[in-house]
Every structure is written in structure tokens, then in C-alpha cells.
């Protein structure tokens, strides 16, 4: 059976967690392949809110295997905390969670460096989540990182950690004038975490290739989104991994041929957290209405999200890059009550109308949105369960998005709960 991917088609926070949770029933395995505890997936089950930063969203489904692949950067403290939270709610992950030995660990010095670096760059800071993601990926690329296999082997851990703490302390003290970190403290903590995580650490690439060979259904769960991808997003205002479907094969240890069905997740509008270009941003009371109505505050950092209309050229770019088969459009309910709803159909850049998303960041920084307004609807749509029962204006708006992006919708979400969802009937 071909694998399915669920990828954020905007700037993250599109509702991927809910989408994965909805279709996880059909999966045997749910895999994260990039990012780390910078993600924040919220799933509401029978009124109980679950927020995951690191665990795949399949953890709420008994009998599914959850995998943190080699492309993820794993903060052992967050992982142990999330596993503990689930267990305290009576959800056991015993035998249902494996972590790649090749996944790099996020250690206390990565967080310290992330925060020092962001503080230093006041004014031009990226607005990272402060979770140490960039510094951990930098160590991976610099070939000095500590992988899960090192974490669970005390001898290897001591040697690699000593070199790292020494190196990082030079930067922390000499460059930033901050106090040095204590090796023994970091080592004792990491050794203890390694002991507790040892049984989870595996060659997950081999696990996944076997699952695929046996015809199991494997779901790949993206974190962040295409526009935050390190290669294809609004660099440098991006995260440090491939947050689109192009990162799946490398981050999971499987062939790109295995991915048969790709779902792009978008909101019916756009949001962005942190700095960087965001052409459709609304700086008026309509942006405020989206933020309040959509509870647009970061699941990881609590920061208010920037809000704007749905950006068609950006979504079309994401769809072309990932070859999405279908869209999952979320938060349509948040648009209820607007007299008119907008779509950014093109940009004006240096006096020219441009309807293709320009990938060079300074161009997108200068882009002014060309917005087309459509009639809004006043009805609360949260209890609507079939497309035909939506107000005509809401239906037209969804159809307009799909036609302009060139991808049909397959899931439509009209509220936070699992039940507030419709699936397109196979035609
Ligand atoms: P980092 O991933 O913490 O390094 O942050 C880099 C950029 O990605 C910042 O603008 C963050 O706000 C953004 N970012 C990281 N993770 C997420 C996410 O899960 N949702 C939305 N934005 C994110």
C-alpha cells in the first residue's frame, strides 16, 4: 500500500495534527521525519485537549506504531515529559513508539545558544521558538552532533558530550559573555535520559522499509510547513529542516517512490508566527477577528500569530513543489461572520503584477497583496457535516480556493473537534 503524507502548505499551524488524528485510523504507522519540539499539534478528543510537540499525532490511536525518524531533532527531556503525560492519562505507549538511533538530540546548550543568538540579533531576529532547533541541526551539519545512539551508550555519550560542552562554552562565554554550562550537570541528565529511552531507540529506517514491504499503511506527518522549509521557504525566516514532502525520504530512510498520496493542509486563511515576509497579513480589525476567532496563539510559545487572507500564489507554489493530490482545508468556521472574505490572487512587486510566488525573499518582502473579495456568510458552520449543507457563499469560497490552487479538497474542517469535519465522497 502506498504511503500517505500530510504536509503543511502554508507557514505552519495549519491543523496537521487534527488531520493526522482523523485519518490515523487507516494507518498502521505514523512517522515524523523532521523538526523537533518546535512543533505544536493540538488535537481535541471528546473535549480533552492534547498538545504534542514531539510525539506523532498517532499516539492517541491504540495499535498504531509511532516513529520519530532520523530527520527529527529529539529533545530527550520533552520526549520523556510527553510520554509521561500520556501515561498519566492512562495512555500507554509501550511497544507503540520508536525513535531513530540516527536522530540528533537537542541538548541544553542548543536551547541556550538558540536564545542567546536570537537575543543578539534584536531587530532582525527570526523569532524562533527558542527550542534549540537551529543549533541542533547546525551540529548535525557540522558533524559534531549527538545522536540517539550516542545518548544511550554511556561511553560514547561522555566523550562526545565533553567535546561539545567545551566547544559550546567557548562560544557562550567569549562571544556572548554568558556563564559557562556545567559538564557534569549536562552529562548526568543526559545519561539518565539515555537509560530511560534506551528501549525505544532503533534503526527506524529498517522498521519503515519492512512495514512498507509488508503492505502496511504508513503516514508521514509534517511539522511546520512549506513556506518555513529551509530550502524552499522564506529563507532566512524559516526553520532548519525540510518541512515539505521533499524531506520525507531523507528524514525517514525510505525511497521517495514509496509516497503515493500527498495531502496539503491549509487554513481557509493564513497565519504566520515569528518574523519574515507574509504578504497577505491584515493589520486591521479583520486580522484581529481572525486571531480571536481562530485562537491564533502559538501552541508552543503562546505568541499571537500574524493573520491574513488565504494566499493563492503561495499555496499554488506549495502544491507544485509537493504535488499535492488533495487539500485538507481547516478552520472554515473562523470566517463565519465576515461580510466579505478575501483571497490574495497575485502580488504587486515593484509596480508589476506577479501571479507566481517569487522565491527570492527580498521580492516577497516587497510584494503587496492584490486581494479579491468574495461574499461572506453569517451562519455558524461548526455543526455542518456535509458540503451541500454549507451556506452557498462558504461553498463557493472553498471551490474558489481549490480552482485557483489547482488541487481538490478532500477534507474540510469546520471546528476544532474530530466530529467537525467532512470528507469528500469519492466520485
Ligand atoms: P525554529 O524552528 O524554532 O528555529 O523557528 C524558526 C521559525 O519557524 C520561526 O519563525 C518560528 O516561529 C517558526 N516555527 C517553528 N515551528 C513552528 C510551528 O510548528 N508552527 C509555526 N511556526 C513555526
Image (cartoon, grey):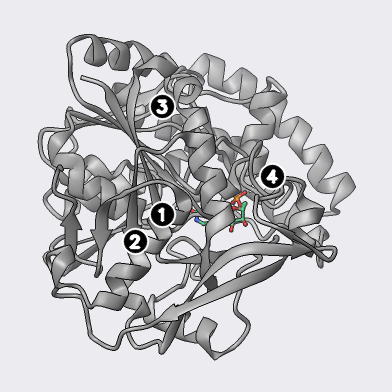
Comparing labels 1 and 4, the label whose residue is closer to the camera: 1
Q: CA distance from mark 1 to mark 4?
A: 55 Å
Of the two numbered discs 3 and 4 on the same chain, state the one appearing first in sequence: 3
The disc label shown at residue 69, or none = 3
The disc label shown at residue 403, or none = 1
Comparing labels 4 and 2, the label whose residue is closer to the camera: 2
The reply to whether residue 200 is visible in this rendering is: yes
- Relative placement, left or right, of 274 versus 193 is right
Q: Position of residue 176 (x, y in %)?
A: 84, 52
Q: Is residue 170 above or below residue 289?
A: above
Question: Image quadrant of residue 4?
Answer: top left
Which residue is painted at 60% across and 36% down in the image? Answer: 184
Which residue is painted at 65% across and 50% down in the image? Answer: 356
Quadrant where the image shows the N terminus: top left
The residue pinned by badge 4 equals 181
Residue toward you, 245 or 167: 245
Residue toward you, 391 or 259: 391
The residue pinned by badge 2 equals 399
Q: Is residue 159 above or below residue 116?
A: above
Of the two numbered discs 1 and 3 on the same chain, state the one appearing first in sequence: 3
Of the two numbered discs 1 and 4 on the same chain, state the one appearing first in sequence: 4
Question: Image quadrant of residue 340?
Answer: bottom left
Q: CA distance from mark 2 to mark 3?
A: 36 Å
Q: CA distance from mark 2 to mark 1?
A: 6 Å
The disc label shown at residue 271, or none = none
Amino acid at each position: 500500500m502506498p504511503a500517505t503524507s500530510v504536509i503543511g502548505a502554508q507557514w505552519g499551524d495549519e491543523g496537521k495534527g487534527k488531520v493526522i488524528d482523523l485519518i490515523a485510523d487507516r494507518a498502521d504507522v505514523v512517522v515524523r521525519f523532521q523538526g523537533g519540539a518546535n512543533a505544536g499539534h493540538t488535537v481535541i478528543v471528546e473535549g480533552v485537549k492534547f498538545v504534542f510537540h514531539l510525539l506523532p499525532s498517532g499516539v492517541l490511536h491504540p495499535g498504531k506504531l509511532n516513529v520519530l525518524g532520523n530527520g527529527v531533532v529529539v529533545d530527550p527531556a520533552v520526549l520523556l515529559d510527553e510520554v509521561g503525560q500520556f501515561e498519566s492519562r492512562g495512555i500507554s505507549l509501550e511497544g507503540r513508539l520508536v525513535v531513530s538511533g540516527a536522530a540528533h538530540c537537542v541538548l541544553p546548550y542548543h536551547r541556550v545558544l538558540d536564545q542567546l543568538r536570537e537575543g543578539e540579533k534584536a531587530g532582525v531576529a527570526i523569532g524562533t521558538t527558542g527550542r534549540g532547533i537551529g543549533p541542533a541541526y547546525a551540529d548535525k551539519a557540522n558533524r559534531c552532533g549527538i545522536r540517539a545512539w550516542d545518548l544511550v551508550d554511556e561511553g560514547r555519550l561522555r566523550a562526545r558530550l565533553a567535546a561539545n560542552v567545551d566547544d559550546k562554552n567557548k562560544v557562550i562565554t567569549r562571544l556572548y559573555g554568558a556563564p559557562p554550562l556545567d559538564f557534569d550537570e549536562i552529562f548526568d541528565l543526559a545519561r539518565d535520559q539515555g537509560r530511560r529511552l534506551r528501549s525505544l531507540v532503533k534503526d527506524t529506517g529498517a522498521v519503515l522499509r519492512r512495514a512498507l514491504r509488508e503492505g502496511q499503511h504508513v503516514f508521514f506527518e509534517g511539522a511546520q510547513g512549506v513556506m518555513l522549509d529551509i530550502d524552499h521557504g522564506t529563507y532566512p525566516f524559516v526553520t532548519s529542516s525540510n518541512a515539505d514532502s521533499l524531506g520525507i525520504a531523507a528524514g525517514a530512510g525510505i525511497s521517495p517512490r514509496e509516497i503515493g498520496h500527498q495531502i496539503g493542509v491549509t487554513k481557509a486563511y493564513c497565519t504566520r508566527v515569528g518574523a519574515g515576509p507574509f504578504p497577505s497579513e491584515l493589520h486591521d480589525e479583520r486580522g484581529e477577528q481572525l486571531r480571536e476567532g481562530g485562537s491564533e496563539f502559538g501552541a508552543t510559545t503562546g505568541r499571537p500569530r500574524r493573520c491574513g487572507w488565504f494566499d493563492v500564489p503561495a499555496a499554488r507554489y506549495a502544491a507544485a513543489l509537493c504535488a499535492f493530490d488533495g487539500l485538507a482545508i481547516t478552520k472554515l468556521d473562523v470566517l463565519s461572520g465576515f461580510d466579505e472574505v478575501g483571497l490574495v490572487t497575485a502580488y504587486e512587486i515593484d509596480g508589476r503584477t506577479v501571479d507566481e510566488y517569487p522565491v527570492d525573499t527580498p521580492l516577497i518582502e516587497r510584494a503587496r497583496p492584490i486581494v479579491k473579495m468574495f461574499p461572506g456568510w453569517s451562519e455558524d458552520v461548526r455543526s455542518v457535516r456535509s458540503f451541500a449543507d454549507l451556506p452557498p457563499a462558504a461553498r463557493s469560497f472553498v471551490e474558489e480556493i481549490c480552482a485557483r490552487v489547482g488541487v481538490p479538497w478532500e477534507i474540510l474542517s469546520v471546528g476544532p473537534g474530530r466530529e467537525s469535519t467532512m470528507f469528500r465522497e469519492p466520485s
